[in-house]
Image (tube, rainbow, N blue to C red):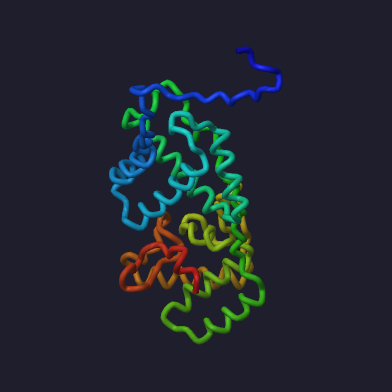
Protein backbone atom coordinates (compact mmCIF):
# COMPACT_ATOMS: atom_id res chain seq x y z
CA UNK A 1 0.00 0.00 0.00
CA UNK A 2 1.46 3.29 -1.06
CA UNK A 3 1.78 5.95 1.63
CA UNK A 4 -0.12 9.15 1.09
CA UNK A 5 1.56 12.55 1.15
CA UNK A 6 -0.11 13.16 4.49
CA UNK A 7 1.71 10.28 6.18
CA UNK A 8 4.20 11.57 8.81
CA UNK A 9 7.95 11.03 8.25
CA UNK A 10 9.34 8.89 11.01
CA UNK A 11 12.66 9.99 12.62
CA UNK A 12 15.78 8.06 11.71
CA UNK A 13 17.30 6.25 14.69
CA UNK A 14 20.85 4.89 14.49
CA UNK A 15 21.30 1.81 16.62
CA UNK A 16 24.90 0.81 17.34
CA UNK A 17 25.84 -2.75 16.48
CA UNK A 18 26.54 -5.03 19.40
CA UNK A 19 30.13 -6.09 19.80
CA UNK A 20 31.48 -2.78 18.43
CA UNK A 21 34.73 -1.22 19.75
CA UNK A 22 34.24 0.45 23.11
CA UNK A 23 35.53 3.97 23.75
CA UNK A 24 39.03 3.83 25.26
CA UNK A 25 39.52 5.67 28.56
CA UNK A 26 41.58 8.89 28.32
CA UNK A 27 45.20 8.27 29.09
CA UNK A 28 46.78 10.35 31.85
CA UNK A 29 49.35 12.82 30.55
CA UNK A 30 53.00 11.74 30.70
CA UNK A 31 55.14 12.92 33.63
CA UNK A 32 56.21 16.55 33.39
CA UNK A 33 59.77 16.21 32.18
CA UNK A 34 60.53 19.89 32.66
CA UNK A 35 59.91 19.77 36.39
CA UNK A 36 61.91 16.58 36.74
CA UNK A 37 64.81 18.31 35.01
CA UNK A 38 64.49 21.29 37.35
CA UNK A 39 64.75 19.00 40.37
CA UNK A 40 67.77 17.22 38.90
CA UNK A 41 69.44 20.58 38.24
CA UNK A 42 68.83 21.66 41.84
CA UNK A 43 70.12 18.35 43.16
CA UNK A 44 73.38 18.72 41.28
CA UNK A 45 74.01 22.37 42.16
CA UNK A 46 74.72 21.56 45.79
CA UNK A 47 73.30 24.93 46.85
CA UNK A 48 71.74 25.61 50.24
CA UNK A 49 68.08 24.83 50.83
CA UNK A 50 67.12 28.51 50.69
CA UNK A 51 68.96 29.03 47.40
CA UNK A 52 67.38 25.92 45.90
CA UNK A 53 63.97 27.16 46.98
CA UNK A 54 64.60 30.47 45.19
CA UNK A 55 65.88 28.76 42.03
CA UNK A 56 62.93 26.37 42.01
CA UNK A 57 60.44 29.21 42.31
CA UNK A 58 62.03 31.12 39.43
CA UNK A 59 62.23 28.13 37.09
CA UNK A 60 58.73 26.90 37.89
CA UNK A 61 57.39 30.41 37.32
CA UNK A 62 59.00 30.48 33.88
CA UNK A 63 57.73 26.98 33.07
CA UNK A 64 54.18 28.06 33.94
CA UNK A 65 54.44 31.07 31.65
CA UNK A 66 56.05 29.23 28.75
CA UNK A 67 54.45 25.82 28.25
CA UNK A 68 57.11 24.52 25.89
CA UNK A 69 59.77 21.91 26.25
CA UNK A 70 63.12 23.35 27.28
CA UNK A 71 64.44 22.60 23.78
CA UNK A 72 61.71 24.68 22.12
CA UNK A 73 62.09 27.80 24.26
CA UNK A 74 63.19 30.84 22.23
CA UNK A 75 64.82 34.16 23.17
CA UNK A 76 61.42 35.74 22.51
CA UNK A 77 59.89 33.55 25.23
CA UNK A 78 62.52 34.67 27.70
CA UNK A 79 61.97 38.29 26.66
CA UNK A 80 58.27 37.87 27.43
CA UNK A 81 59.21 36.42 30.82
CA UNK A 82 61.34 39.46 31.59
CA UNK A 83 58.49 41.80 30.64
CA UNK A 84 56.18 39.88 32.97
CA UNK A 85 58.65 40.31 35.82
CA UNK A 86 58.80 44.04 35.12
CA UNK A 87 55.01 44.30 35.17
CA UNK A 88 55.02 42.64 38.58
CA UNK A 89 57.20 45.50 39.82
CA UNK A 90 60.39 43.53 40.39
CA UNK A 91 63.60 45.53 40.68
CA UNK A 92 66.43 45.17 38.18
CA UNK A 93 68.50 43.09 40.62
CA UNK A 94 65.64 40.59 41.09
CA UNK A 95 64.99 40.38 37.34
CA UNK A 96 68.68 39.78 36.65
CA UNK A 97 68.77 37.08 39.31
CA UNK A 98 65.87 35.28 37.62
CA UNK A 99 67.55 35.57 34.20
CA UNK A 100 70.86 34.31 35.58
CA UNK A 101 69.06 31.33 37.11
CA UNK A 102 67.72 30.48 33.65
CA UNK A 103 71.23 30.84 32.21
CA UNK A 104 72.66 28.51 34.83
CA UNK A 105 69.93 25.99 34.17
CA UNK A 106 70.51 25.97 30.41
CA UNK A 107 74.26 25.70 30.84
CA UNK A 108 73.69 22.69 33.11
CA UNK A 109 71.23 21.26 30.56
CA UNK A 110 73.90 21.42 27.88
CA UNK A 111 76.60 19.93 30.11
CA UNK A 112 74.28 17.03 30.94
CA UNK A 113 73.67 16.36 27.22
CA UNK A 114 70.11 17.61 27.47
CA UNK A 115 70.63 20.38 24.92
CA UNK A 116 72.38 20.12 21.51
CA UNK A 117 75.94 21.45 21.45
CA UNK A 118 75.48 22.96 17.98
CA UNK A 119 72.32 24.90 18.93
CA UNK A 120 72.56 28.34 20.56
CA UNK A 121 71.08 28.56 24.01
CA UNK A 122 68.00 30.81 24.16
CA UNK A 123 69.59 32.69 27.06
CA UNK A 124 72.62 33.71 24.96
CA UNK A 125 70.71 36.50 23.22
CA UNK A 126 69.27 38.01 26.41
CA UNK A 127 70.98 40.99 28.05
CA UNK A 128 70.59 41.74 31.73
CA UNK A 129 68.67 44.73 33.02
CA UNK A 130 70.64 47.92 33.45
CA UNK A 131 70.98 48.79 37.10
CA UNK A 132 71.20 52.36 38.38
CA UNK A 133 74.68 53.58 39.19
CA UNK A 134 75.32 53.69 42.93
CA UNK A 135 75.38 57.14 44.42
CA UNK A 136 78.78 58.71 44.75
CA UNK A 137 80.28 58.17 48.18
CA UNK A 138 81.47 61.75 48.56
CA UNK A 139 81.15 63.35 51.97
CA UNK A 140 79.58 66.79 52.03
CA UNK A 141 80.98 69.72 53.99
CA UNK A 142 78.49 69.41 56.84
CA UNK A 143 79.40 65.77 57.44
CA UNK A 144 83.10 66.57 57.24
CA UNK A 145 82.64 69.27 59.89
CA UNK A 146 80.97 66.78 62.21
CA UNK A 147 83.77 64.27 61.62
CA UNK A 148 86.41 66.83 62.56
CA UNK A 149 84.56 67.47 65.84
CA UNK A 150 84.46 63.77 66.64
CA UNK A 151 88.14 63.36 65.84
CA UNK A 152 89.05 66.01 68.40
CA UNK A 153 87.84 63.56 71.05
CA UNK A 154 89.55 60.45 69.71
CA UNK A 155 93.02 59.35 70.72
CA UNK A 156 94.00 55.86 69.50
CA UNK A 157 93.30 56.34 65.79
CA UNK A 158 93.12 60.13 65.70
CA UNK A 159 96.21 60.69 63.50
CA UNK A 160 95.08 58.19 60.88
CA UNK A 161 91.49 59.34 60.87
CA UNK A 162 92.42 63.02 60.58
CA UNK A 163 94.56 62.15 57.56
CA UNK A 164 91.64 60.22 56.06
CA UNK A 165 89.20 63.11 56.50
CA UNK A 166 91.78 65.53 55.08
CA UNK A 167 92.10 63.38 51.95
CA UNK A 168 88.34 62.92 51.56
CA UNK A 169 87.84 66.68 51.83
CA UNK A 170 89.56 66.98 48.41
CA UNK A 171 86.70 65.20 46.65
CA UNK A 172 87.99 61.62 46.69
CA UNK A 173 85.58 58.72 46.97
CA UNK A 174 86.02 56.42 49.92
CA UNK A 175 86.91 53.57 47.54
CA UNK A 176 89.57 55.70 45.83
CA UNK A 177 91.15 56.73 49.13
CA UNK A 178 91.05 53.14 50.36
CA UNK A 179 93.04 52.01 47.30
CA UNK A 180 95.84 54.51 47.87
CA UNK A 181 99.36 53.23 48.54
CA UNK A 182 102.21 55.12 50.19
CA UNK A 183 103.93 55.36 46.78
CA UNK A 184 101.00 57.43 45.47
CA UNK A 185 102.05 60.36 47.68
CA UNK A 186 105.06 62.55 46.89
CA UNK A 187 104.68 65.06 49.70
CA UNK A 188 102.42 67.44 47.80
CA UNK A 189 100.39 65.50 45.26
CA UNK A 190 98.32 62.32 45.49
CA UNK A 191 98.03 60.08 42.44
CA UNK A 192 94.45 58.84 42.56
CA UNK A 193 93.35 55.88 40.43
CA UNK A 194 89.84 56.62 39.17
CA UNK A 195 88.37 53.15 38.69
CA UNK A 196 85.42 54.17 36.51
CA UNK A 197 87.42 56.37 34.15
CA UNK A 198 90.38 53.97 34.35
CA UNK A 199 92.87 56.80 34.57
CA UNK A 200 95.07 58.46 37.16
CA UNK A 201 94.35 61.93 38.52
CA UNK A 202 96.79 64.13 40.41
CA UNK A 203 95.24 65.78 43.44
CA UNK A 204 97.20 68.58 45.09
CA UNK A 205 96.52 68.59 48.81
CA UNK A 206 96.13 71.72 50.89
CA UNK A 207 98.84 72.65 53.42
CA UNK A 208 96.63 71.46 56.30
CA UNK A 209 95.88 68.13 54.58
CA UNK A 210 99.58 67.60 53.82
CA UNK A 211 100.37 68.17 57.47
CA UNK A 212 97.84 65.60 58.70
CA UNK A 213 99.00 63.01 56.17
CA UNK A 214 102.70 63.50 56.96
CA UNK A 215 102.08 63.34 60.72
CA UNK A 216 100.24 60.06 60.23
CA UNK A 217 103.01 58.57 58.08
CA UNK A 218 105.65 59.68 60.60
CA UNK A 219 103.67 57.95 63.34
CA UNK A 220 103.75 54.77 61.24
CA UNK A 221 107.54 55.03 60.90
CA UNK A 222 107.86 55.22 64.68
CA UNK A 223 105.59 52.20 65.11
CA UNK A 224 107.60 50.15 62.61
CA UNK A 225 106.85 46.51 61.85
CA UNK A 226 103.68 46.05 59.81
CA UNK A 227 103.11 49.81 60.00
CA UNK A 228 106.41 50.73 58.30
CA UNK A 229 105.31 53.00 55.38
CA UNK A 230 107.14 51.22 52.56
CA UNK A 231 106.12 52.41 49.05
CA UNK A 232 104.00 49.37 48.16
CA UNK A 233 102.06 49.31 51.44
CA UNK A 234 98.53 50.66 51.78
CA UNK A 235 98.25 54.30 52.75
CA UNK A 236 95.67 53.71 55.46
CA UNK A 237 95.93 50.64 57.69
CA UNK A 238 93.52 48.98 60.06
CA UNK A 239 94.41 49.15 63.74
CA UNK A 240 91.92 46.64 65.08
CA UNK A 241 93.54 43.61 66.76
CA UNK A 242 91.96 41.06 64.34
CA UNK A 243 93.24 42.80 61.18
CA UNK A 244 96.14 44.84 62.50
CA UNK A 245 98.30 46.39 59.79
CA UNK A 246 96.09 45.36 56.88
CA UNK A 247 94.60 47.75 54.32
CA UNK A 248 91.65 49.59 55.79
CA UNK A 249 88.74 48.10 53.83
CA UNK A 250 85.59 49.79 52.68
CA UNK A 251 83.67 48.78 55.82
CA UNK A 252 86.32 50.43 57.92
CA UNK A 253 85.71 53.73 56.14
CA UNK A 254 82.13 53.82 57.39
CA UNK A 255 83.19 55.51 60.60
Vertical comparison of 7 with 246: above or below: above
Q: In which quadrant is the N terminus drawn?
A: top right
Image coords of residue 246 (percent x, y): 37, 63
User: Is residue 33 in sight in this rendering?
Assistant: no
Residue furthest toward the bottom? 153
Above-or-below relation of 158 to 181: below
Residue at the farthest front position:
1
- Residue in view at x 29 percent, y 45 percent: 43
In which image quadrant can residue 81 be found?
A: top right
Out of 37 and 67, give the one closest to the viewer: 67
**Residue that appears at 64% across and 67% down:** 206
> Could you say where residue 172 lies in the image, as x and y percent from the top left?
59, 61
How far across and how far down the image is residue 226, in percent?
A: 33, 65
Of 238 and 221, which appears nearest the observer? Answer: 238
* Quarter holding residue 217: bottom left
Is any part of residue 123 visible from this angle?
yes
Frontmost residue, 230 versus 108: 108
Residue located 33% across and 46% down the image: 42
The answer to whether residue 115 is above or below residue 159 is above
Q: Residue at x 46, y 62 (%)?
A: 235
Please tell me in which quadrant of the rendered image residue 169 appears.
bottom right
Please state which of residues 76 and 146 is positioned toward the viewer in this rendering.
Answer: 76
Amino acid sequence: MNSSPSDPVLPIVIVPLEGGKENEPRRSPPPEMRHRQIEEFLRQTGKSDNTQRTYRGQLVRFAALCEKSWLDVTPSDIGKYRRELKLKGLKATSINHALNTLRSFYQWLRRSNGYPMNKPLPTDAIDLERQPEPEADHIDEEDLGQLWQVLELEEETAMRDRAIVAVLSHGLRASEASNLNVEHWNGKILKVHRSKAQNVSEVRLSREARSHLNVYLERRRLQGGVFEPVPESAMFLAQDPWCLGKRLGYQGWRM
